[in-house]
Image (tube, rainbow, N blue to C red):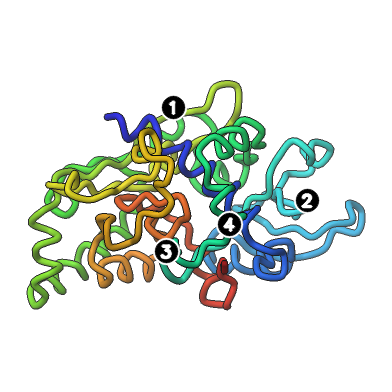
């Protein structure tokens, strides 16, 4: 599927752009106490023990018994601390509480959204260190990840995803079905689902960088008749240099109530990214914890 070959690019560029477009006072992602506490709150059964290591001179959390140090936001094991300059901060963007609207974009932001500028930034981007995700989801290799991938019916379609998120997905499914019984818009959303894409292994050559689909932590809900609207910025940018000016009402989107249900269970929606991907949901509960605490990306 063409979309799957482009998804990782969109996520990478989004995080780069969000980091550049927001002022430090707005982002607050460089505060170890806030970020580490958000991880403990988001993953209470796996992430514990925020503490300070005087020998190392840094804060750390324990993730399933292994210490990960703050390392200026990189979340590294002790034996990786000498490589801090190779990695980007784990939380390098904040999740907006609403869809960014082109009417609010500054000239500088519009220039950053130029496809040629984005491509240069992507080529210079550093990867994330995957230790945190490996400890949370047992996925340092494709073989280990696929041992955790299960395939089940979901919202009427067959979906493959990591076993860790299926309980959350089941709660979402139940709430959506319950809502559809009394809400016509939600019922039409369900009736118009063409397919749901989940796990899809994909690495970027020579770098330990993967989209959340490669961890089985994201799903894409593809609607029937989506070509009547726009769903993915990268597709449009191939022939429209002013793709960033397309207003939200010309993009496909699930009903607001469906998005809210996903968010309640820890899934962020790609439609709120500057580089919008309106069919995409991924499990990032720590970003929603930060949002509840008032840390959101602002223009």
Residue sitting at 58 percent across and 47 percent down?
Answer: 112
Of pointers 4 and 1, the one earlier in the residue sequence: 4
Q: Quadrant of residue 150?
A: top left
Residue 126 pos. (x, y %): 67, 37
Of pointers 1 and 3, the one earlier in the residue sequence: 1
Vertical placement of residue 108 versus 184, above or below:
above
* Secondary structure state at the residue bearing disc 1: helix
Provide the residue designation for mark 3.
266
Vertical placement of residue 190 versus 120, above or below:
below
Provide the residue designation for mark 1.
143
Q: Nearer the viewer, residue 239 or 226?
A: 239
Per the model, the C-alpha gap separating discs 1 and 3 is: 26 Å
Provide the residue designation for mark 2.
71
Residue 259 pos. (x, y %): 31, 66
Residue sitting at 43 percent across and 29 percent down?
Answer: 202
Q: Which mark is residue 107?
A: 4
Residue 165 pos. (x, y %): 37, 53
Per the model, the C-alpha gap separating discs 3 and 4 is: 33 Å
Per the model, the C-alpha gap separating discs 4 and 1 is: 46 Å
| Front tag of 1 and 3 | 3
Q: Are marks 3 and 2 in contact (CB under 8 Å)?
A: no
Of pointers 3 and 4, the one earlier in the residue sequence: 4
Q: Residue furthest top?
A: 206
Of pointers 4 and 2, the one earlier in the residue sequence: 2
Per the model, the C-alpha gap separating discs 4 and 2 is: 34 Å
Q: Is residue 269 left or right of residue 37?
A: left
């Amino acid at each position: 599927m063409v979309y799957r070959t482009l998804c990782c690019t969109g996520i990478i560029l989004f995080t780069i752009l969000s980091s550049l477009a927001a002022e430090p006072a707005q982002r607050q992602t460089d505060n170890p106490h806030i970020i580490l506490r958000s991880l403990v709150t988001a993953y209470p059964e796996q992430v514990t023990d925020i503490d300070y290591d005087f020998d190392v001179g840094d804060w750390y959390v324990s993730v399933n018994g292994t210490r990960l140090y703050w390392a200026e936001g990189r979340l590294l094991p002790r034996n990786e601390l000498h490589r801090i300059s190779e990695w980007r901060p784990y939380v390098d963007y904040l999740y907006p509480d609403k869809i960014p609207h082109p009417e609010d974009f500054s000239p500088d932001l519009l220039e950053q959204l130029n496809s040629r500028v984005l491509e240069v930034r992507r080529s210079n981007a550093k990867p994330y260190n995957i230790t945190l995700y490996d400890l949370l989801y047992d996925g340092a290799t494709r073989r280990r990840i696929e041992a955790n991938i299960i395939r089940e019916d979901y919202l009427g379609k067959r979906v493959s995803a990591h076993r860790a998120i299926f309980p959350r997905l089941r709660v979402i499914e139940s709430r959506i079905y319950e809502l559809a019984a009394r809400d016509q818009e939600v019922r039409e959303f369900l009736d118009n689902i063409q397919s749901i894409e989940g796990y899809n292994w994909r690495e970027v050559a020579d770098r330990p960088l993967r989209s959340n689909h490669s961890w089985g932590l994201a799903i894409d809900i593809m609607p029937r008749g989506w070509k009547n609207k726009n769903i993915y910025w990268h597709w449009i940018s191939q022939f429209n240099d002013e793709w960033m000016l397309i207003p939200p009402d010309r993009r496909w989107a699930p009903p607001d109530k469906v998005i809210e249900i996903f968010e309640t269970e820890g899934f962020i929606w790609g439609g709120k990214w500057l580089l919008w991907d309106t069919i995409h949901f991924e499990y990032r509960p720590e970003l929603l914890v930060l949002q509840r605490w008032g840390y959101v990306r602002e223009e």
